[in-house]
Amino acid sequence: MTDFASFAGQCQQRINNKLIQCLPDTDAPAERLCSAMRYSVLNGGKRIRPMLAYAAADAVGSINEATDAIAAAVELIHAYSLIHDDLPAMDNDDLRRGKPTCHIAFDEATAILAGDALQSLAFEQLTQLPDMDADTCLRLIRLLSVAAGAEGMVAGQAIDIEAADHALTLPELCHMHRKKTGALISASITMSAIAAGADKSQLNALEKFGHALGLAFQVQDDILDITSDTDTLGKKQGADEARNKPTFVSLLGLEQAKEKLSQLHCESLEALSGFDDKANHLRSIGNYIVSRNH
Ligand code: GRG
């Protein structure tokens, strides 16, 4: 097993245990809601954002219980965003991670509420950081709020919805994805690094890394939408094309989209040049993100 495979396996086990522990039991008063929350969070997923949080903590300090809480917070926000993104009012998808989407497995109202409750649960995690001073807790809560809200992920989603059937320029497409996908990916790295005691210059470098990697993640997502298949992806292949959504491939063509991916990958690695081997897990996650097949 490679170093990265073993690190990824350990992260996945660690975050899954944390998520199981923080999700409400299915015998809670709102039993259907809690089942939908558990279904949507525990139904697979690559756990890339938690992995980045663990690797960032490792690069600047060490992994501890605060890292677990931050990793859970970003994954819960991610799970909520996927549930809402799949709803009929948004992308209207019926397949996610190879299984029926939340509103298909349950119903639309339950899916909306499960997303809402997962978002609250994410912020609750940041109120329970062991050995963390109040100022740092507030800083982390603010970072996640900005990344997830109307300046970050939700803004990106709103721009995306408005952009369907419109031509976007490359800078506009990058702007949209930096918010929609990139903001939460960057926050996973910076929040965890702050909690692990990163200094200003480390944080600067990690912000650059997250910025490049967040966009690279989306370019690869657009490439996979064209080159992969539904079984491998666990979601409908070609969905962006069918919806006439602007993508890096529709704008640049496949070859130039691959070139853009390679540029962003180099940029992300360059940002880590001042780090020693302790940043190798971050480097490996970067390599994985640009070469993943789902
Ligand atoms: C609805 C508020 C709201 C926001 C939605 C992020 C987002 C905004 C929607 C997700 C739609 C989507 C498929 C975007 C492409 C990039 C992306 C986030 C893919 C899914 O992330 P992975 O590959 O998923 O990390 P897993 O299943 O591995 O967790």
Image (cartoon, rainbow, N blue to C red):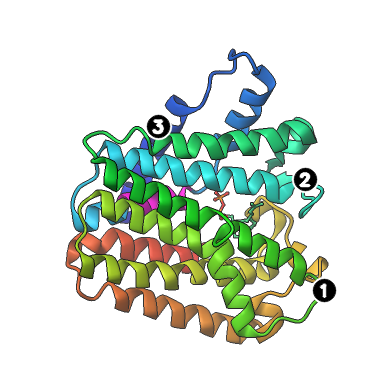
Callout 2–callout 3 Cβ contact below 8 Å: no
Instruction: Say what amino acid the circle numbered 2 marks.
Output: Asp
Q: Which residues are magenta?
A: 47-54
Image quarter for residue 251?
A: bottom right
Residue 141 image offset from top left, x and y in percent: 41, 46
Residue 118 image offset from top left, x and y in percent: 56, 36
- Which dot marks residue 165? 1
Image quarter for residue 230?
A: bottom right
| CA gap, disc 2 and disc 3 | 28 Å
Q: Which residue is mark 3?
A: 18
Whether residue 13 is visible to the viewer of this picture, yes or no, is yes
Q: Residues within 10 Å of mark 1 (few under 14, many from 20)?
A: few
Quadrant where the image shows the C terminus: bottom right
User: Could you say which is closer to the camera, residue 247 or residue 188?
Assistant: 188
Check the image and report above or below for 155 versus 33.
below
Residue 239 image offset from top left, x and y in percent: 76, 62
Instruction: Say what amino acid the circle numbered 3 marks.
Output: Lys
